[in-house]
Amino acid sequence: MNLQQSAKDRADQLVTDRLAVEKFAIGQSAPRKEDPMLLRGAGHYADDFALPGQAYVVMVRSQNAHGVIRAIDTDAARKMPGVLGVYTAADLKGYGPLKCVVPFNNRDGSPMKKPLREALAKDKVRYVGDPIAFVVAETVLTAKDAAEAVSVDIEALPAVITAEAAAQNGAPQIYDDVPGNIALDYHYGNAEAVNTAFAQAAHVTRLTLVNSRLVVNAMEPRAALGSYDGNRFTLHVGSQGVFGMRANIAEALGVAAKDVHVVTGQVGGSFGMKAAVFPEYICVLHAARALGRPVKWTDERSGSFVSDSHGRNHDVIGELALAADGTFLAVRLTSYANMGAFLSPVAPMPGTLNAVKNVQGMYRTPLIEVSTKCAFTNTSHVSAYRGAGRPEGNYYMERLIDAAAAEMGIDRLTLRRRNQIRPQDLPYKTASAVTYDSGDFAALTKQAFDLADGKNFPRRKRESRKRGKLRGFGIGNFLEVTAPPSKDLADIKFNPDGTVTLTTGTQDFGMGHATPFAQVLSERLGIPFEKISMLQGDSDRLAIGGGSGGSKSIMHSGTAIVEAAAKVIAKGKEIAAHVLEAGASDIAFEHGRFVIVGTDRSISLIDLAQKLNSGEMPPADVPQSLDVTHISDGPGGSTFPNGCHIAEVEVDPDTGVVEVVKYSCVNDFGTVINPMIVAGQLHGGVVQGIGQALMERTVYDSDGQLLTGSFMDYAMPRAADVPSFVLADHPAPAKTNPLGVKGCGEAGCAGALTSVMNAVIDALSDRGIHHVNMPLAPFQIWQALQDAKASQRQ
């Protein structure tokens, strides 16, 4: 009876364990693990870190966009009570420059220009906000007062604001060693073949397209806390990956990587911006070493408008060549890309290589040519911003398609379907030299049209007209090429208390990694979801780490977790064979348990780990631990998330105000680990895309002064500006990674930017308007309507 009861208990426990795992399995909307902590206010963001005896930094920034530094007088500031030090570029000698890491060549084969960027301006200032000096004091208020007492004599020089103007003869020269202000003259494609295609085309569509400059405006401004113990630097900072941040900080300081420790807690948004080393980080570490005490800097919103990197900012002439039946023959982009006053680590990529990869979209366009002049200007530097060239590339193509359809009298949905890559074409090598492995583009587009109730749009348009509104229907297909593969870490540690710690080399900066990563590990090893915790953000705990960016985290960490889990199982079979007194070849792993095949004898993975942690050691020829530290080579390639987003808008012709009244989308993110988190990522991206399309605008005057330097002048999307979103999936699992997943973090921008722009222009087409550039703010639309009315009178 006892034996029967024991067998029944084991069977019942097996069922219970299996149900617990299935509840949080891949595909389930498990609640985010970190939310209870964050809702209690227990998170640790960069400004929450504090150390005993810390001093405070305030930066002294240029108020001129361009000029020669004649003198810096710090005497008054140094004499103020509570001031510990005032530092200029002269004090930071010996530190390395902040580098652009991408290795591009000009079209003539020569290397691009990468002028040195030091932490503090030495001889010349090049934008409003350029850091010139910094003050360290006992309190923030004292440091602010002292910073205002620093006198800087600058001989003002003429400024240049746009990339196109900077590239013209006679423009103010920002760097002596960069003739014509051109950092990179980029070219991709077979110009001769493209020219032939355009010459033979039955129709050519040309548009002048603006990809407007954006201020990143992360919810949490940047902050940094530095300390030095006599041998080693420690930096608490918001980042997108501590391993890479440590390497770059060490290089800038001129020390070995082992002599730098970087810690990142929670991060209140980044969108690409916080991935880089900024001047302030070098400043706090220098001061910490010089003063022998911790030093902290926290930006304010007004400072972040000028000191953070900005996003986008490309001016493009887009051209699409078509045959008489609408078949795409070639696409050509001729662009100016604004780098700002210096190069960020990846500054040239969005307007060059990423434009090449993403303008292809989901279409069989056989030829692509991209020519981009990346120019320095007297503005804040431009870097990666959510999507970093992927939303832009898709936007250029989708606007050209809508314009071509109108000019040729072809239905815009029909034109897209006629040129979409078909399932039988896969794998498909594109003109951008990328091979797509998966996707069902035509079926996905049809599903989106049906989800949006496209066939009844004419009725809704008539109803809007009765209310005096113009209604538009916008299609935004997209296909993104995510970041390429790289090495990453999965470290699995079984703790004495029965829990498991998973350490990864990626970095959560708001995406919610802990939950989907735990779901993957739970499903692979049968470990209860609630027993898994995640560790990130400590460079001392990482053997390697690629950080996060380019919508890559689930592919890279997911692949590493799957591979590490397989190693745990392999080790566990050997250990279980010893414990169960069987041969390793007779051990199977099922639902979190090691089982002797053909018997009911088994032991759970967690119980096996507990035996080892309690001191029950196996023989020397058997693994002594289930713990695994695994460095993965990464997935087999990029992934290609794609979708069709459809927006409907109403435009008030009397005021120019746009309301997004309906938004539907179907997306292919391959295997979806956690639908709720994916939906949240999608919502955020869509809202940012709507913000760029309709309201966000960065304006400089001719002297280089930022006119939209606060939320009084820079409009941000709010909840009232967006409708409820209707979402659906059409998954075609990726073949480049073991989970079949595709990136999702930046896709919302790509779909929203295009669909909303196309919807507004569709609405305005009733009044004879066929193209307007972003942002489509009320005045811009009102002015376009007035101009159209005036031209019709002539």
Image (cartoon, helix red, strand yellow):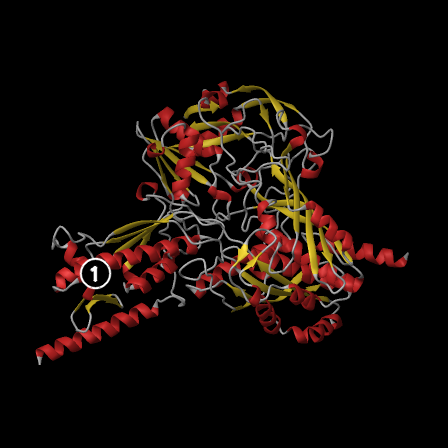
Query: How many tags in the picture?
Result: 1
User: Can you identify the residue that label 1 sits on?
Assistant: 573
Q: Nearer the viewer, residue 177 or 86?
A: 177
As drawn, 85 above or below 564:
above
Q: Is residue 649 above or below residue 282?
A: below
Q: Quadrant of the C terminus?
A: bottom right
Place of residue 719 in the rendered image (x, y in percent of width and height, measured from the top left): 56, 60
- Is the residue 98 above or below the residue 153 in the image? below
Q: Is residue 665 among the parts visible in the rendering? A: no
Left or right: residue 688 compared with residue 507: right
Q: Label 1's element?
A: helix
Quarter of the rendering occupied by the N terminus:
bottom left
Question: Picture quarter containing residue 395?
Answer: bottom right
Q: Which residue is rendered at x = 48% and y = 22% of the image?
A: 77
- Which residue is rendered at x = 55% and y = 42% of the image? 383
In percent of width and height, residue 180 lies at: 68, 30
Q: Give the class, few, some or many, for how many residues have Cα within 10 Å of label 1's Cα (few <14, many ≥20).
A: many
Name the residue furthest right: 794
Q: Quadrant of residue 251?
A: top left
Q: Quadrant of residue 297?
A: top left
The type of residue carrying mark 1 is Lys
Residue 217 visible here: yes
Query: As drawn, which residue projects farthest toward the bottom?
Result: 1
Where does the image place residue 94, in percent across and percent down from the top left? Answer: 44, 22
Q: Nearer the viewer, residue 76 or 134?
A: 134
Residue 120 as seen in the image, left or right of residue 655: left
Image height of 501 relative to 335, above or below = below
* Residue lying furthest left: 1
